[in-house]
Amino acid sequence: MALYVIQARGADQASLERATIIKDGFSWPAFFFAQIWLIYHRLWIPLLIWILAEVAFALVMLPHVAAGTLVAVDFLAHLFIGFEGNRLRQAKAARRAVLVGVVEGRTRDAAEARFFDRLLPAGGLETQP
């Protein structure tokens, strides 16, 4: 089972209903489609760093290294985004939200259900009239 980090802007019902739920672990879509994945999640600074690093590598190192080196470096960059992509999303969410909880679940929906099941008996949500 995977761990999911839940971040919200507050502890009231409206904030918890709009909470961000992010898987903690490797992201296959980020590994295979790194640049598109960064754009989709609006991670502009990591995308800019990615582009600058690729351009710098192509201009400075490519003329002096073997052809297979570019493939190896690109694979390692994709692997890095696969491992750290969800942490980048968590860091972005942490700028405007607080950590509400960490739950375990097979899927995102199962983790969300487990979080709210755990929260409801404790009286964590208050209904508004």
Image (spheres, helix red, strand yellow):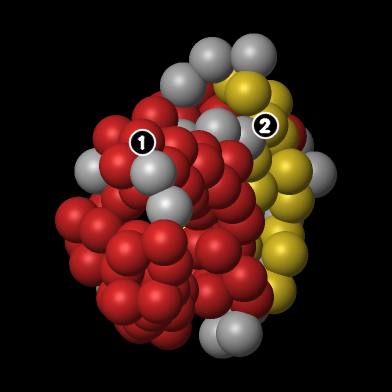
Name the mark nearer the viewer: 2 or 1. Answer: 1
Nearer to the camera, 52 or 60 = 60
Q: Residue at x 50, y 62 (%)?
A: 89
Give the residue number, with chain letter if any, for mark 1. 68
Q: Residue at x 40, y 76 (%)?
A: 60
> Residue at 63% across / 23% down in the picture?
2
Q: Residues within 10 Å of mark 2 (few under 14, many from 20)?
A: some
Q: Residue at x 26, y 58 (%)?
A: 35
The kind of secondary structure element at disc 2 is strand
The tag on residue 29 is none
Residue 85, given in percent of the width and then of the height, sits at 50, 52
In percent of width and height, residue 39 lies at 23, 67
As helix, strand or loop, the secondary structure at mark 1 comes to helix
Crowding near the residue tagged with mark 1, few <14, some 14–19, many ≥20 C-alpha atoms within 10 Å: few
Residue 2 visible in the snapshot: yes
Q: Which is nearer the eye, 89 or 38?
A: 38
Residue 106 position by quadrant: top right
Instruction: Tell me: residue 55, above or below residue 16.
Output: below
The residue tagged 2 is: 3
User: The C terminus is located in which quarter?
Assistant: bottom left
Mark nearer the N terminus (2 vs 1): 2
